[in-house]
Image (cartoon, helix red, strand yellow):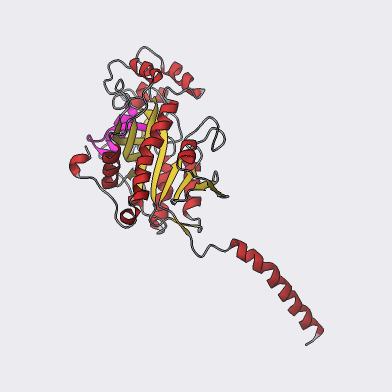
Amino acid sequence: MTRIASFFCAALIAWSLHVAPLAAQTAPPTNPIPIKVVVVNMFERGEDTGDAPGEFQLWVEREHLDQVLPLDAGYHHVRLNKDGVLGLLTGVGTAKAAASVMSLGLDPRFDLSKAYWIVAGIGGGDPADVSLGSAVWIDHMIDSDYAYEIDAREMPVGWLTGRIPMGHATPYEQPVTIRPGDPIYTLNPQLVGWAYALTKDVPLADTDGIRAARARFNGYPNATRPPFVTHGDGLSGSTFWHGKLFDDWANAWVQYYLGSQANFMEAAMEDTGTLQALTFLSNAGRLDMKRVLILRTISNYDQQAPNQSAEDSLKQMATGNYSAYMESLEAAERVGDKVVRDIVEHWSDREATLPSAPASAQK
């Protein structure tokens, strides 16, 4: 062997010894962790445990999500328990939610092929339909940001809104056209019906504070009820809108796309981002969209009380002072966890077969 050949041989051996450990560190696991349920929350106020809670903390503590795993391409680390329940914190807004869900969905450490996904968070509620601290299983979710818009001060006479459906030139223009790729999501009605039937009688926290807050909504029978579990339609977008006129728009917008039988109940900020990422991941065979649920609980009404201005109402919330903040966090975990526990405890059935409720139980 020549001196040059010997040099290259030695260099090759040195390179292989250097690369082998690196490859071992970065190679995907041969046996990905099978996940039964992914719980998706959107925000946390501080640490994961032991301080003032956001959406994540009650799940971490009560589901014993004790194993911390890094998710470098996502917003926050994930947490796992011994039952195969994985907790994901996405960050606020559709962009962070989509990126974080995609990061988890493509992570080779996890087998998500049979996982159920439960998005559990708080949101604003329509006082015509829900009360503070109530829980809403979502039937359909529509992107509230996906539109044309002109400033309302420049609207033609007769327009009710400056928001215009994509592909049209006037508000609520007929015929309605829903194009492939439009961000309108229908959750699996059989699974939603099952989750609702399973949880509709879950007792929810009712306190003097939310009783006083909802009493201001005299004339809205559902708003003055004690907290309850229901199901209905939602809007999701990164703009936190508020006020009676926006609520009127939300109801009309949902009915425009879904028909007169639709019923807007809840406003969120992340769910269309989450659902878009989940749809792409499902198309890639990474998960099953039929196993996705969204649960939103009502921390505040989406409009001002009678005899109050929208400005004053929003000022109160801009400081994080939601009328039913703790009660809605409690409801999200209490209602959502009943579904999680059922899936885990009946995994021998739930892994292969999706549950559904009798039609009579879904009303």
Q: Is residue 50 visible?
A: yes
- In the displayed structure image, the side of residue 89 where residue 225 appears, left or right: left
Q: Which residue appears at 22% of the width and 40% of the height?
A: 362
Res. 147 image quadrant: top left
Give the percent coordinates (x, y) of residue 93.
48, 37
For the residue pair 337 and 117, the one nearer the viewer reads as 337
Q: Residue furthest left?
A: 360
For the residue pair 337 and 230, the one nearer the viewer reads as 337
Q: The magenta stretch spans which residues?
A: 248-268
Q: Which residue appears at 70% of the width and 68% of the height?
A: 18
The number of callouts visible is 0
Residue 336 lies in the magenta stretch: no
- In the displayed structure image, the side of residue 291 where residue 86 appears, left or right: right
- In the displayed structure image, the side of residue 326 where residue 355 appears, left or right: left
Quadrant of the snapshot with the N terminus:
bottom right
Residue 266 lies in the magenta stretch: yes
In the image, residue 46 above or below residue 154: below
Q: Residue furthest right?
A: 3
Give the percent coordinates (x, y) of residue 242.
41, 25
Q: Residue furthest top?
A: 307
- In the displayed structure image, the side of residue 113 where residue 24 appears, left or right: right
In the image, residue 266 above or below residue 309: below
Quadrant of the snapshot with the C terminus:
top left
Give the percent coordinates (x, y) of residue 292.
36, 47
Give the percent coordinates (x, y) of residue 121.
42, 36
Res. 326 image quadrant: top left
Q: Is residue 171 visible?
A: no
In the image, residue 356 above or below residue 172: below
In the image, residue 5 above or below residue 166: below
